[in-house]
Each structure stands twice: as C-alpha cells, then as structure tokens.
Image (cartoon, grey):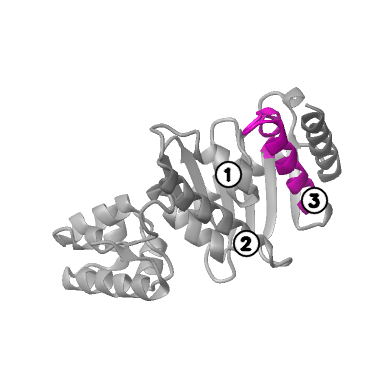
Amino acid sequence: MAIQDSPQSRQEYGRELRRRREAAGLSQEELSVRAVMSRTHIAHIEGGRRRPDAEDARRLDEVLGAGGVLVRFLPTLGEGRVAEHFAEALELERQATVIRVYGPKLVPGVLQTEAYARAVLGSGFPAKTADERDKLLVTRLQRGRILRDFHSPVYWALLDEAVLRRPVGGPAVMCEQLCHIAKLGEHDRIRVHVLPFAGGLHALMEGVVSLMWFDDLPPVAYVEGLSVGRVLEVPSAVSACQAAYDHALGDALSHGASLALIKSAAKEYEHA
C-alpha cells in the first residue's frame, strides 16, 4: 500500500519505528549499528523530520522483525514523480538554506528549463511513456520554485564545461537554457562557476554530489550514479564531500568569468 509523503505520514511512520524499536529493547544507537545507519538519521526519522529510503526501510524492518510493515508503509512521493533513490534528497532540498551542487554533464535539475528538462527525461532507457514523462516533468519544474525566494536557499552551481557543450535538445533549447542560468547569475540569485576543459582533472571527476545545509539539522551530502543515489549523513563522509567540492571549486573560473563563458556558449547556439 503506497502512503503519500506528507509531514503527517512521516510523523506516523516515525512513531511506528520508535514503538517497534522500544519494543525490541534497542536504543537509537544500538539500532543504528545493527541497521548500518547513523543514529542522527534514525532520530530524524522517528521525529518525522526525514524519511528513510527504500534500502534503509528494508534494513530497519529486518532488524526489528517488522514483517515488511516498515517497507510497505514507507511514505512515498507518488508513482512516477521521482526516482526512489532521489526521494529523500528531494525532501531535503526543499528544507535546505544553503545548497551547493556539482553538474558534470547535465544542468542540475533546479536550474533546468522546461524544454531542457523534457529533452533529458525523454532520453532515458528504457523509454518512458508520455504520461510518465509528464509526471516527472512536473516534479522537475516544481524543484525550481525554491529559487523564487531571493534569500533562501543560497544556491551555488559548479558546472563542468561539458554541461555547456553537450547540445541537449538542440541549439534553441541550449540557448534558452544557458540564458536562463546567466540571468539568474546576473541577478545574484545563484552563484555559478565553470570548470573549464583546459583545467584538466579535478576533485569531482568521479561523480555527482550535492551539499546541503539547514537551520536546525546537520549538513548532508547527496551522491549519485546511474540509477543509484545516497544521502550521506555521517560527519566524516559529509566533510570529505565538502572538501572535494572546495578543492574543485578552487580550479573553477570566477563567477564573472563563468557567466561570460556561459553567455558566449549561448550565442554560439543562437547562431547555430
């Protein structure tokens, strides 16, 4: 049975997890060791502030002998709205006060225009139906709403030059997309840095990472690969991701130089 994700459903799930943990005679720390999760993550789940991903729910269910209850009643974002491995990161993205993302090949979702997002969502394998693409597109575009409030979140985008050069959707789509990023950067809504091809190797070559900070929660990192993703909460792992991001940022162009490069690439697509 799919339970729609909401603050109330997360609180109910958290209460059920706490009830079963206490019935098993386990502390949060003891459960964290057995389920291979951080104690703070379990505390946030029990408090209704976060939801576990499917794999976390499976391990919690197994450790507590819940017979599948903690998997079946896991609050979800709804079929087709977002990949399961990204569900927790999406919720955290809405709560974050500071977000720093790295885009190695594609424009990060929050910055995507409708035409660009439609092209990306139509390129996957196996192919999606038109209805499936439309559902995913709605969620993708809704993510951009977090930029409507000028002050929150503070948003940094670190882009590999490949993001500018890969013609997703064709020249017109790319021109519109890059102009959109440049406009946000010019109006100080985002800070953007480009890692140029000429710089060679850098510290984030091996994958996608997003860093998020919050007012009342510890920072997290979200890392992603092909059809897999994971929210990292262990302080040492988060710090390692932050350090790698900072190292790569040191190899990037300045905000001003990055905007100039983005505008130049947009003009090339316009002329094409």
Amino acid type, mark 2: Arg
Mark with earlier residue (1, 3): 1
Callouts 2 and 3 close, C-beta under 8 Å: no
Image-based side of 237 in relation to 111, left or right: left
Q: Give yes or no for contact between labels 1 and 3 (Cβ–Cβ under 8 Å).
A: no
Q: Is residue 77 above or below residue 168?
A: below
Of circles 1 and 2, which is in front?
A: 1
**Residue that extends furthest to the front in the rendered view of this protein:** 130
For badge 3, the amino acid type reads Lys
Q: Quadrant of residue 17?
A: bottom left
Q: Of 199 and 263, which appears nearest the observer? A: 263
Identify the disc placed on residue 7: none
Q: Position of residue 165 (x, y in %)?
A: 70, 28
Q: Which residues are magenta?
A: 159-185
Q: Residue at x 31, y 52 (%)?
A: 54
Asked which secondary structure carries label 3, the reply is helix
Q: Determine which residue is flagged by label 3.
A: 183
Q: Secondary structure at mark 1?
A: helix
- First reached walking from the N terminus: tag 2 or tag 3: 2
Q: CA distance from mark 1 to mark 2?
A: 15 Å
Q: Is 7 part of what is drawn in magenta?
A: no
Instruction: Name the dominant secondary structure of the magenta segment.
Output: helix
